[in-house]
Amino acid sequence: MADLSLNGLSKHYGDFYAVREVSLTIADGEFLVLLGPSGCGKTTTLRMVAGFIEPSAGHVRLAGQDVTLLPPWKRNAGMVFQSYALFPHMTVAQNVAFGLEMRKLPRADIERRVEEALALVRLGGYGGRLPRQLSGGQQQRVALARALAIRPDVLLLDEPLSNLDAKLRQEVRVEIRELQRQLGLTTVMVTHDQEEALTMADRLVVMNEGSVRQVGSQRDLYERPADRFVAGFVGRTTFLAGTVEAPGRFRSDGGLALACAGGSPGRAALSLRPERIEIGLQPRSGLDNSLSGTVEFVSYLGALIDIHVRLSPSDRLVVQIANREGGFTPEVGQPVHVGWSASAGQVFNE
Ligand SMILES: Nc1ncnc2c1ncn2[C@@H]1O[C@H](COP(=O)(O)OP(=O)(O)O)[C@@H](O)[C@H]1O
Ligand SMILES: [Mg+2]
C-alpha cells in the first residue's frame, strides 16, 4: 500500500514557522491537493515529504516505513519541481535517467525505464534532445517522466502547471489526472490556484501561514468553510462587516438589519456567496432578507454576469446570475431589489 502520512510535521527557521504541525493521511491512489496563498508553506511541506528539507519536528511515513530522516534517493517519492528543474546541459534521456542513476540501477534497466517513462508522457523519440529544444509543455512532461521513471510510491507535484499558458494548463490538468488514475499513483499536488485545485483534487487541504485550516471535499470547503480565511479563499464571497446582536440577527456597519443563521453576539463578518442572492426589479418576496440597492458595476463573463450592488454607504454586495435569454440585464445606476434566505449566509465571529 503506497499510503502516505504526515504526523506533526513542522519546519521553523529561527522563530519563524514555515510549516506548523501538519498532520495528514493520504490514501493509496488518492490525488490530494494542498491549496493556499503564496508563502503559506506548501513547497516546504512537499520538500519535507520528498526529503529535500529536514523537518524540525514530526514524521513522514511512506508505504508503511518511517522515512523522516532518509535522503531523497532512499525514499520512493517522485517529485516535479515548480520550475521543472531540468538540467539544461543534459539530454531529455539523461534528465529522466537521473533518479535511476542516483539509485544505482543497472544500465540496461535504466535505458528501459527511461523509454517507458518517456512513452507514458508521449515523448517517445525525444530522448536525444536538450530541454531548450522543447516547448514549455514538453519540458513539463520531461519533468513528469523523470519523477515517474523511479516508479514512485508517491508522486509529488509542486505547482506543475504554473509555467504553462492558460489553454495548455487546462489540457495538461486532464493529462496528469488520466495518467495518475491509469497508474493508480498516490499523489500530492501543491497549488495556489483554486480553480486548478478544485478541478483536479479528490480531496483538498487548505493551508494558511504554515498551518492546515481545513481538509475536505470541494463541497465541504465551499458549503461549510471552517473559518473566514477558507470562505474567502475557496470560491468567491462578499463579507459584510458588522455585529451579531443576537443569534440570527446581524447588523451591518452600514446599518442594515439582516437575518442570519446562528452566530454569537459580538463583532462578525457575514459571508454571502454571489450565486445565492436573488436580484430583480421587483422586491424579492418569501425570503428572510429583502433589500433595495443600486447597480454600481457589471462584469459580463459570458455564461455568467457579476453585478455589484450598493446597499448602503458602507455595504456593497456581489450578485452572480446566469446569463439566460430574456433574463434580467442589469445596467449601472439602475435601482434593484436583492434578497436571500438566512441560511444562505455564514457568520464568522471575530
Ligand atoms: N530557507 C528558508 N529560510 C527562511 N525562510 C524560508 C526558507 N524557505 C522558505 N521560507 C519561508 O517559509 C514560508 C513558506 O515558504 P514556501 O513553503 O516556499 O511557501 P509556498 O510554497 O506556499 O509559497 C515563506 O514565508 C518563505 O519565505
Ligand atoms: Mg511554493
Image: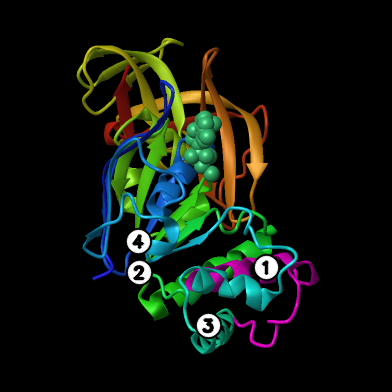
Label 2: how many Cα within 10 Å (few below 14, some 14–19, many 20+)? many
Mark 1 or mark 4: which is in front?
Answer: 1
Residue 110, disc: 3
Label 3: how many Cα within 10 Å (few below 14, some 14–19, many 20+)? many
Secondary structure found at label 2: loop
Say left or right for 232 vs 281.
Answer: left
Report the amino acid beneath label 4.
Asp
Q: Which residue is mark 1?
A: 139
Mark 4 or mark 2: which is in front?
Answer: 2
Secondary structure found at label 1: helix
Q: Which residue is mark 4?
A: 202
Disc 4 + disc 3, Cβ < 8 Å:
no
Q: First in sequence: mark 1 or mark 3?
A: 3
The C terminus sits in image quarter:
top left
Mark 1 or mark 3: which is in front?
Answer: 3
User: Quarter-wise, where is residue 273 in the image?
Assistant: top left
In the rendered view, tell whether residue 122 sits above or below residue 348.
Answer: below
Tell me the CA gap for discs 1 and 3: 20 Å
- In the rendered image, residue 318, in percent from the top left (x then y), is placed at 52, 33
For the record, the magenta segment spans 122-148
Q: Which residue is mark 2?
A: 153
Pick whichever, 35 or 144, lies toward us: 144
Say left or right for 40 vs 331.
Answer: left
Of all residues, the one furthest to the right in this rendering is 133
Label 4: how many Cα within 10 Å (few below 14, some 14–19, many 20+)? some
Disc 1 + disc 3, Cβ < 8 Å:
no
